[in-house]
Image (cartoon, grey):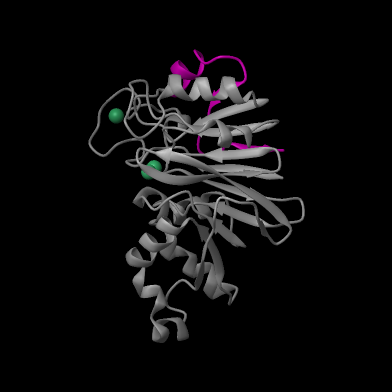
Amino acid sequence: MKVIILGSGTSQGVPVIGCKCETCSSSNPKDKRLRTSAYIETNEGVKLLIDTSIDFRQQMLKNKIDNLDAVLYTHHHVDHINGMDDLRQITQRYDKFIDLYANETTVEEMKISFRYVFNEELIKYKSVPLVNFHVIKNEMLRIKNVDIIPVECMHGNLKIFGYRINNFAYITDCSAISDNELKKLEGLKVLVINALRIRPHPTHFNLQEAIEISKRVKPKRTFFTHLTHDILHDKINSTLPKRIELAYDGLEFNI
Ligand SMILES: [Zn+2]
Ligand SMILES: [Zn+2]
Ligand SMILES: [Zn+2]
């Protein structure tokens, strides 16, 4: 299974418009962060995306991805959903509907944000993304032949999903996770988890909290994502404990 981190940035992306800080001025490509999203391709060729970030179009072009079987959504915040309209290029080209999976709140909110995709006239002319929404519960689901385990986390007061696929788990925008849900993360080869910044934040793990989760779960490798411009890549990466690294856009690994 191949995983590509398409975006490792928080909601504003990095650089932040108008900001002159050290990270936003950095020439290191690892300090350029599109909005958070990941692509997974199984050995059997099943192509899954986690979240259609605001930067979805750019991410597909940059990574030469031209088809998807399904999208798993973590939650409905705009940085995670607003690229959805550009699924249209795939649904037109391959003349198909794409299945979108999310919890109930996310589906309800997306149906409001993207209400035009239900317009029958527009569907007929394929001028909207052709999508099927599926509400998923906190129980295993199968897409094609891939088993996916949702992992429920709290994002402030909002219940959201991370996902485990085989020995890989992807969690973003989490600020708390119960012991029961943490058990689903045993025996991971790779954990990707959000670590917003150094200072605490009410609705996202900061660096120290993400380190603590990684130490409890004990995956072989951990990558931090959804990073703000407080995180200068090389400086912070060198301070992290063993087997924990900062993710960056275009990071690719096989599991
Ligand atoms: Zn976010
Ligand atoms: Zn900045
Ligand atoms: Zn969020």
Viewer-nearest residue: 242 or 164: 164
Quarter assignment of residue 33: top left
Q: Is residue 125 magenta?
A: no
Q: Quadrant of the C terminus?
A: top right
166 with respect to 222 (left or right): right
Q: Quadrant of residue 112?
A: bottom left
Location of residue 154 with respect to 230 vertically, above or below: below
Q: Please tell me which residue lies in front, 240 or 238.
A: 240
Taking the image as shown, residue 97 lies to the left or right of residue 199, namely right
Q: In the figure, is residue 11 to the left or right of 129?
A: left
Image coordinates of residue 83 in percent, x first then y, are: 41, 57
Quadrant position of ligand 3? top left
Please report the bounds of the magenta region as a residue range. Answer: 233-255
| Residue that appears at 51% across and 14% down | 238
Q: Position of residue 133 (x, y in %)?
A: 50, 67
In the foreground, 19 or 228: 228
**Residue 181 against residue 237 in the figure, above or below:** below
Residue 247 appears in view = no
Residue drawn at x 56%, y 66% as measured from the top left? 99
Q: Is residue 210 visible?
A: yes
**Quadrant into which the N terminus falls:** top right
